[in-house]
């Protein structure tokens, strides 16, 4: 059996990687030829049938149970303890699911659509949702802990094995759980169980917006060995599934927010997202291209200018104050800033070409209007200008 490299360099020293390489070493033993044939035959058999997540999950679970019995009866594992058999099964799960990953992960259009819808909704919520909207007590509002939990959750999509994806969820939830425990010890906060834990997990999930959240959760449910989806692992997985469902169905009534305010914020966020993904205005691009090619073409009409100026939209941070911004807002602000600079550059180039080549615009020179040469300003002033606009 060929060696599959670990998902990340740091996994080389992890227990799961040691189990994986021990499993591969034993599979290289000539005495394991019958096991190798069974494993490869099962992997190849998947290409004979169209993808069906539920049926595929049952096939994989049945195969794992069959292989566990085969390992216990095999001479290479004669006298092996339950722990050693379990380690071998962990290695088998990782090997099989890594080989079948492209076939089993997000394999249906429906799953891909759900992933996209959830990601888009979260991107809208990120622009205005605050801890108080989820009734998170002030004592649990710890940006450093939340950021650490977000990072763990974001790692999930970089792994291919169900166990490693699940470990990312567990690490995220443990960070949150430690936050709750520390608050109860240092501040005498009475823990409310899931009533405290779930809102924080929902908020962390929204701040992180992990890629393909639905598909990752479904993949773990279907292909992680069922004997391992118990206790702490099952509790944390169930909570993240609940968080995902809450976000998917979220509306004003789900939050502590006025319904009109919620709808206005969502609409503003949709407008900002549309602007961020819009291509440069075709009129500007066409005129600039003609000027570069030495073909002035028709005059730049007022209707063209009006259409370009109407490209402006309401930005979600226009009315925000500095103390209201969080670490999670930095990425969004940077995206909006780049969008503004990109559009300004295109407009400036088009107008500069027009002012140099069209005599009817000469009277606008020196007025400081849109057709004038952009002023040279320092980086500090430029930054202050953008921040002052909340973009």
Image (cartoon, rainbow, N blue to C red):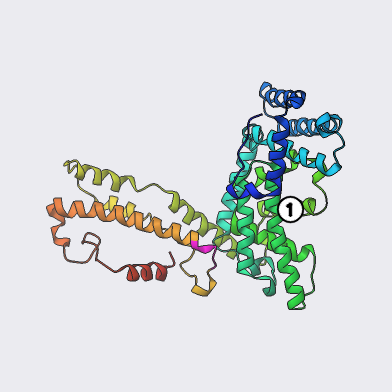
* Above or below: residue 240 compared with residue 98: below
Residue denoted by label 1:
242
Residue 242, given in percent of the width and then of the height, sits at 73, 53
Q: For the point 40% across and 57% down, which residue is it?
A: 338
Q: Secondary structure at mark 1?
A: helix
Residue 12, given in percent of the width and then of the height, sits at 63, 47
**Is any atom of residue 364 visible in this view?**
yes
Q: Nearer the viewer, residue 135 or 198?
A: 198
Give the side of residue 206 with respect to residue 281, left or right. Answer: right
* Above or below: residue 288 compared with residue 44: below
**Is any atom of residue 257 visible in this view?**
no
Q: Nearer the viewer, residue 13 or 247?
A: 13
Residue 265, given in percent of the width and then of the height, sits at 55, 62
Residue 377, given in percent of the width and then of the height, sits at 27, 68
**What residue span does the magenta drawing correspond to?**
326-330
Q: For the point 76% across and 27% down, which residue is it?
A: 32
Magenta segment includes 315: no
Q: For the point 19% across and 52% down, which residue is it?
A: 354
Q: Main secondary structure of the magenta part?
A: loop
Task: Give the crowd class for mark 1: few <14, some 14-19, many >=20 residues within 10 Å.
Answer: some
Give the side of residue 350 with respect to residue 366, left or right. Answer: right
Q: For the point 20% across and 44% down, which residue is it?
A: 292
- Spot the residue most to the top: 48
Q: Nearer the viewer, residue 320 or 136?
A: 136
State the quadrant of the N terminus. top right
Residue 381: name its quadrant.
bottom left
């Amino acid at each position: 059996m060929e060696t599959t490299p670990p998902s990340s360099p740091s996994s080389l020293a992890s227990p799961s990687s040691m189990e994986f390489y021990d499993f591969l070493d034993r599979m290289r033993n000539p005495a394991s030829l019958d096991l190798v044939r069974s494993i490869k035959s099962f992997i190849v058999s998947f290409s004979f049938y169209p993808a069906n997540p539920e049926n595929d999950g049952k096939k994989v679970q049945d195969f794992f149970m069959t292989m566990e019995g085969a390992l216990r009866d095999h001479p290479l594992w004669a006298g092996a303890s339950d722990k050693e058999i379990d380690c071998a099964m962990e290695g088998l799960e990782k090997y099989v699911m890594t080989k079948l990953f492209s076939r089993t992960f997000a394999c249906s259009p429906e799953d891909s659509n759900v992933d996209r819808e959830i990601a888009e909704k979260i991107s809208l919520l990120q622009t205005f949702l605050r801890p108080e909207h989820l009734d998170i007590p002030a004592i649990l509002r710890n940006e450093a802990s939340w950021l650490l939990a977000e990072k763990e959750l974001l790692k999930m999509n970089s792994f291919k094995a169900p166990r490693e994806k699940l470990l990312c969820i567990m690490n995220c939830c443990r960070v949150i759980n430690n936050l709750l425990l520390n608050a109860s010890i240092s501040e005498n906060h009475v823990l409310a169980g899931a009533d405290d834990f779930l809102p924080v997990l929902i908020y962390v999930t929204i701040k992180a917006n992990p890629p393909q959240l639905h598909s990752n959760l479904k993949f773990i449910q279907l292909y992680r060995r069922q004997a391992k989806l118990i206790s702490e692992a099952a509790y944390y997985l169930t909570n993240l599934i609940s968080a995902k469902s809450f976000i998917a169905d979220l509306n004003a009534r789900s939050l502590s927010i006025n319904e009109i305010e919620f709808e206005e914020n969502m609409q503003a966020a949709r407008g900002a997202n549309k602007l961020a993904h819009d291509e440069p205005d075709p009129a500007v691009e066409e005129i600039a291209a003609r000027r570069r090619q030495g073909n002035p073409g028709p005059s730049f009409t007022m209707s063209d200018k009006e259409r370009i100026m109407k490209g402006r939209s309401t930005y979600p941070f226009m009315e925000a104050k500095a103390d209201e911004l969080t670490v999670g807002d930095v990425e969004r602000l940077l995206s909006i800033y780049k969008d503004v600079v990109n559009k300004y550059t295109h407009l400036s180039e088009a107008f500069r070409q027009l002012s140099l080549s069209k005599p009817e615009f000469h009277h606008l020179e020196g007025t400081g209007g849109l057709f004038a040469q952009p002023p040279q300003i320092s980086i500090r002033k430029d930054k202050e200008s953008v921040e002052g606009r909340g973009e």
